[in-house]
Image (spheres, rainbow, N blue to C red):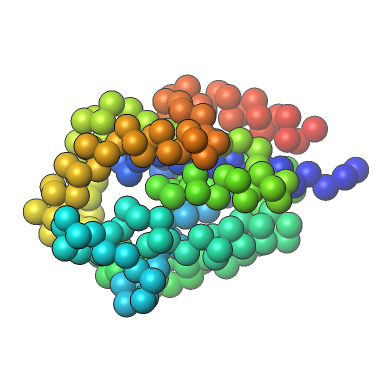
Amino acid sequence: MTEQLARVVVLAGPSGAGKSRLAGRLRDAHGWPIVRLDDFYRDEDDPQMPRSEELGIIDWDHPDSWNRPAALSALETLVRNGSVETPVYDISANRAVDTTVLTARPTDIVLAEGIFAAEIIPDLRQLGLLAGAFCVHHHRWVTFARRLTRDLAERRKPPLTLVRRGLALAREEPVIVQRHVDLGAEPARAAHLEPRLSALADAVAT
């Protein structure tokens, strides 16, 4: 039997849209590994880190704040070899603080989720690794409220910074969603994706 490589499902979408919660439910139901692409943020002192002129801080929402080649390499290694070591990023510390080892069985769907996940859709398709790509989203103010609640609870940044960043992201959300769609992601609500991805898993396993 030919090895099945097209097993990566991309869960893109705005910060706070529910990508991580969806990935967690799918992992619990099926045992699938999650590659948290936000763990591939660059360290704060990385010279390639972009800065936001509007907020006067590092622009964590710019694709250049994320190490795309490292994330893509990790996904390819996991699918081809069955295991990979990935960083563990602490947003409050602005750097990777640890590593973890992920494993995948030959019939597993590999969930790649993160705010920059759509950026690697063309690369995954070219490598023959892509099984599906989705942009998880809700109404922008629902996303704003969920994101702010999460970020305050986790003390990711000072409260004023989180509010200012959240308002900026809410204004930009339609543009963010459209960019992800343009890169190849299908827009979808999280609740609608679970049965679809379960069906996709059956197709991958055959």
Q: Residue furthest front?
A: 53
In the picture shown, does residue 121 fall above or below 141?
below
Q: Nearer the viewer, residue 168 or 82?
A: 168
**Direction from residue 97 to residue 166 in the image, left or right:** left
**Direction from residue 32 to residue 181 in the image, left or right:** left
Give residue 66's position: percent from left, percent from top.
42, 61
Q: Nearer the viewer, residue 121 or 74?
A: 121
In the picture shown, does residue 25 fall above or below 69?
above
Q: Residue furthest left?
A: 160
In the picture shown, does residue 70 fall above or below 131?
below
Quadrant of image for the C terminus: top right
Give residue 87's position: percent from left, percent from top.
47, 67
Q: Nearer the viewer, residue 118 or 105?
A: 118
Quarter occupied by residue 179? top left
Q: Nearer the viewer, residue 42 or 107?
A: 42
Residue at point 32%, 53% (across, down): 61
Give residue 85's position: percent from left, percent from top.
57, 67
Residue at point 13%, 49% (across, down): 164
In the picture shown, does residue 58 fall above or below 8?
below
Please state the total of marks drawn on the protein image: 0
